[in-house]
Amino acid sequence: ARVHSNVTSLNDVNDYSKPADLYKDKLLGGLLAAGFDEDSCLSRYQSFLYRKTAPHKPSPYLLSKLRNYEDLHRRCGPHTQSYNKMVEQLKSGHSTGSMDCQYVVWISFSGLGNRILTLASAFLYALLTNRVLLVDRGKDMDDLFCEPFPEKSWFLPLDFPLTDQFNDFNNESPQCHGNMLKKNVINTSTESLPSYLYLHLIHDYQDHDKLFFCDGDQGILGKVPWLIMKTDNYFVPSLFLIPSFEHELSKLFPEKETVFHLLGRYLFHPSNHVWGLITRYYQTYLAKADERIGIQIRIFDTGTGPFQYVIDQILACTQKEKLLPEVDTQESVVTPADNPKLKVVLMTSLNSGYYENFRNMYWEHPTVTGDVVGVYQPSHEEFQQTEKKLHNRKAWAEMYLLSLTDMLVTSSWSTFGYVAQGLGGLKPWILMKPENQTAPDPPCRRAMSMEPCFHAPPFYDCKAKKGIDTGALVPHVRHCEDMSWGLKVV
Ligand code: GDP
């Protein structure tokens, strides 16, 4: 059911003939736990009105794992007896071996798209290692997202003893896992382990930091109660290459490419004001369309744009792939189509030039099919302003709106686009990266899967202790379409 078809207003929800089914739909096939206060997070219970019924159902095993996680979070979350006890151990500096609960603390770092991907990665890591995920709220995580777990918050309490050090943690910090390995102060036979380790998983990480992705090191990490993680990468593909996680992952995700899709829908519910941005925009510009096409433009070239070669590339892609109709520049007399369709393009970009170009093209000329094309762009913020609240609210709303389209065109290398495709369950057409200001041919390529790309994966064979092509080990972890050295789950 979508707002524009079966359900025309949210009141119609009450008219459903099968309330049980509706309720199931509302909880996304059991993915979401019941029992939240609906008003505090409208998106949790309304999102299904805006999406097609999801063809990718969560496995019963994933559902039971999530319910168990919720119990764990209830028992170990902020200010519980166990949490207080483990914070005392953290302050003591040593792991005492008695571990009521173990934690992975996610540090807020990098652009919003990156943050959403890394948080999902950290949560999967928590599920695989029976840890509790706690989230550093940074500047505005609590402004953008609802609480995903029942009863206990996912936010790290403000008085957490290490928060002041989050900014300074780097791969030379004394508590950095990789740095300790490098200096040989920690190894498999180490008897006394610290109460916490810092995991440096940022794209500039070094060989020793990358040992995080080896079974042997996971064994050591398993004995440390607190892991503090800073990353800007979707590292899930490399978790699939750790033998001790393999079996569990295949049970959790029989359909492998659904990892971010399902965890994303489970975790990321826009807060009420972001939900307002999303639903008002959807109802005004997208609801009445027969077809919605998302085009996400993210240019990493220097200079402000718009660039003609990018305009040409988008045009070549959307027409070659028949996502949008061609226009008749001969101005011949238009015979109206029998049943003209309204196609709506939702464009997102920091710049308004691309949108103006497309909007004018479809206003100034008729399409050869007789269909009409409306082009809309919610904002043009000109440059990335990660520190500003409304800026990030809009960025989140735009990623989400893109995820509500029927067909999606994304830009290479952009985590903003990965979030949209993953939440939407869409395999996008990816605009290949221009070289020397020239659009490549073909201009775009259909993605193999809806999964995000891990931009900085390790290339190391933990057993043989030598370099290896990690994109050629198993059929379901491959190199990405848009970044030849990246890895993605397919
Ligand atoms: P990435 O850099 O494309 O991988 O995506 P990130 O989301 O991590 O960082 C880019 C940031 O730039 C976003 O979070 C926004 O702050 C801003 N940004 C980039 N493209 C857009 C856009 O199309 N719309 C809006 N509103 N912001 C954007």
Image: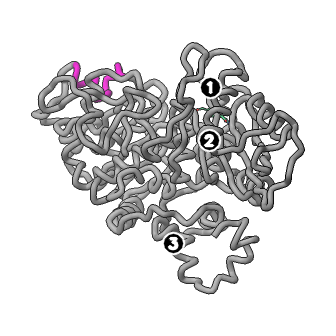
The amino acid on which the numbered mark 2 sits, given as a three-letter code, is Asp
Q: Secondary structure at mark 2?
A: loop
The image quadrant of residue 272 is bottom right
Q: Which residues are magenta?
A: 171-182
The residue lying at 30 percent from left, 27 percent from top is 209
Indicate which disc residue 299 carries: 1
The answer to which of 14 and 490 lies nearer the viewer is 490
The amino acid on which the numbered mark 3 sits, given as a three-letter code, is Ala
Is 268 situated above or below 378? below
The answer to which of 283 and 160 lies nearer the viewer is 283
User: Quarter containing ligand 1?
Assistant: top right
Is 347 situated above or below 2? above
- The alpha-carbon separation of the residues under discs 3 and 1 comes to 41 Å
Relative placement, left or right, of 340 versus 87 is right
- The alpha-carbon separation of the residues under discs 3 and 2 comes to 26 Å
Mark 3 lies on residue: 34
Q: Secondary structure at mark 3?
A: loop
Mark 2 lies on residue: 140
Q: Position of residue 224 (x, y in %)?
A: 25, 41
Q: Position of residue 395 (x, y in %)?
A: 66, 40
Q: Position of residue 167 (x, y in %)?
A: 49, 27
Q: Residue furthest bottom?
A: 17
- Between circles 3 and 2, the one closer to the viewer is 3
Colour pattern of the rendering: one colour
The mark that comes first in sequence, 3 or 1, is: 3
